[in-house]
Image (cartoon, rainbow, N blue to C red):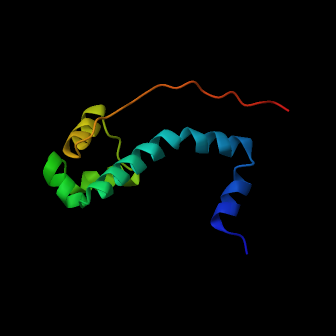
Amino acid sequence: MTTLNDFIEEQLQDPILKEKYDALEPEFAVMQAVIDARKNQGITQKELSELTGISQADISRLERGTGNPSIKTLQRVAHALHMALKIEFVPVKETQKT
């Protein structure tokens, strides 16, 4: 039986699909960072909502990746979690052609 990870790895052999998947990585990273930070603080989405003044529905959208948060929104979340928001540009690794 094929696992989900095996299936994903197989699908990512397609260069076009891999390119599109990789393009989503920054969004996934933001989603996961918010979830991890909130859980590490031991608070619920509702509690984060109360601390930030951002609706619980919008916190949920942010964590699911269906929202499009501004930097100001991310700063509010970071501040409520006693954290600093860090955004950086890093060099892109060039793919080696074989």
Q: Residue at the spot x=25%, y=56% of the render?
A: 57
Which quadrant, please, contains the N terminus? bottom right
Quadrant position of residue 70 = top left
Residue 81 in the image: above or below residue 75: below
Instruction: Give the side of residue 94 with respect to residue 59, left or right.
Output: right
Residue 84 in the image: above or below residue 64: above
Quadrant position of residue 23 = top right
Residue 40 in the image: above or below residue 25: below
- Where residue 97 sits: x, y (%)? 81, 30
Instruction: Give the side of residue 8 with respect to residue 24, left or right.
Output: right
Q: Residue at the spot x=67%, y=45% of the render?
A: 17
Q: As rendered, which of 78 and 63 lies closer to the eye?
A: 78
- Where residue 54 sits: x, y (%)? 19, 48
Instruction: Give the side of residue 97 with respect to residue 52, left or right.
Output: right
Which quadrant, please, contains the C terminus? top right
Q: Residue at the spot x=15%, y=50% of the render?
A: 51
- The furthest residue to the right: 98
Q: As rendered, which of 63 and 34 lies closer to the eye?
A: 34
Instruction: Give the side of residue 16 with respect to residue 24, left or right.
Output: right
Image mark count: 0
- The furthest residue to the bottom: 1
Q: Residue at the spot x=39%, y=30% of the render?
A: 87
- Where residue 64 sits: x, y (%)? 39, 54
- Where residue 94 sits: x, y (%)? 69, 27
